[in-house]
Amino acid sequence: DTEVTQTPKHLVMGMTNKKSLKCEQHMGHRAMYWYKQKAKKPPELMFVYSYEKLSINESVPSRFSPECPNSSLLNLHLHALQPEDSALYLCASSLDGQNTEAFFGQGTRLTVV
Amino acid sequence: GESVGLHLPTLSVQEGDNSIINCAYSNSASDYFIWYKQESGKGPQFIIDIRSNMDKRQGQRVTVLLNKTVKHLSLQIAATQPGDSAVYFCAENNNDYKLSFGAGTTVTVRA
C-alpha cells in the first residue's frame, strides 16, 4: 500500500465555521506533511511532523492547527479562515523525512466563502 | 526533441519527440532531489529521484541529470506521450525535513 488518503476531497466552508481535514497512511512512514497549493503555483510547506511531534511550522497563521493523533493519521483543523485561504491542501508522508521519497495524497480542494 | 537551457513555465512538445525540462535549485547544501508530475485535480506523483553523489539516473522513459556546479537539474522524457501532459515540479531536500518545490513547468503534448 503506497497510498496517502485525504478526506474530504472537496470542502466549502464559511468564515465562521470550524472544519477538519484528515490524512491517513499505512506505509509505516514517520514523517508527515501539510502543504498548501494555490492555482498554477508549486506546493508550499506548512507543517512537518516527525515521529508524531511537530518539527516544522512555516509561520502558518494560528487559524490552521495541525494534529498528529498517531503515526498513521494527520489532521488539519481549520477555524475562522479567510477567502484567500482557499486552495488545494496536500498531505504527504515519507519514511523519516530526511532525503527519502515523499508520497502525496490527492488533496482537499478548500473553498472559503 | 524539445530542449531548453533555462527553466520555462511552459513546454509544448510533439507526440513521440523527447522532452527536456529544466530546473535551477537554490540551496547548494541540498543533497536529494525529486521530480514530481502533477495532473489536473491530483496530487504530485513521484517520477524519479537522485542523490547528490550521482550526476545521472535513469528510469522507465525518464532520465534525471544533476549538475551540482551550476545547481541545475533536468528531466528528460523519451518518446513523449499524450499522458505525459501535466505540470512537472523539481523538489530539493537538504536533510532537514523540508522538501522545497521549484516553480513548475506545464508540458503540453501535441498530437
Image (cartoon, grey):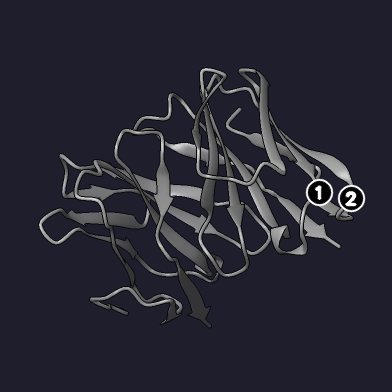
Q: Is residue A23 left or right of residue B25?
A: right
Distance between the alpha carbons at the discs numbered 1 and 2? 5 Å
Disc 2 target residue: A16
Residue at point 49%, 72% (across, down): B106
Which chain hosts label 1?
A
Q: Nearer the viewer, residue A65 or A8?
A: A65
Label 2: few (<14), some (14–19) or many (≥20) C-alpha neighbours in 10 Å: few
Q: Percent position (x, y) of residue B98?
A: 41, 40
Dot label at residue A80: 1
Q: Is residue B4 left or right of residue B15?
A: left
Q: Percent position (x, y) of residue A2?
A: 57, 32
Res B21 → quadrant: bottom left
Q: Nearer the viewer, residue B31 or A12?
A: A12
Residue at point 69%, 36% (across, down): A65
Circle 1/circle 2 CB separation < 8 Å:
yes
Res B25 → quadrant: bottom left
Res B69 → quadrant: bottom left
Q: Are tags 1 and 2 found on a single chain?
A: yes
Question: In the figure, A96 relative to B39: above or below?
Answer: above
Q: Tell me which numbered mark, 1 or 2, is placed earlier along the sequence.
A: 2
Q: Percent position (x, y) of residue B75?
A: 32, 61
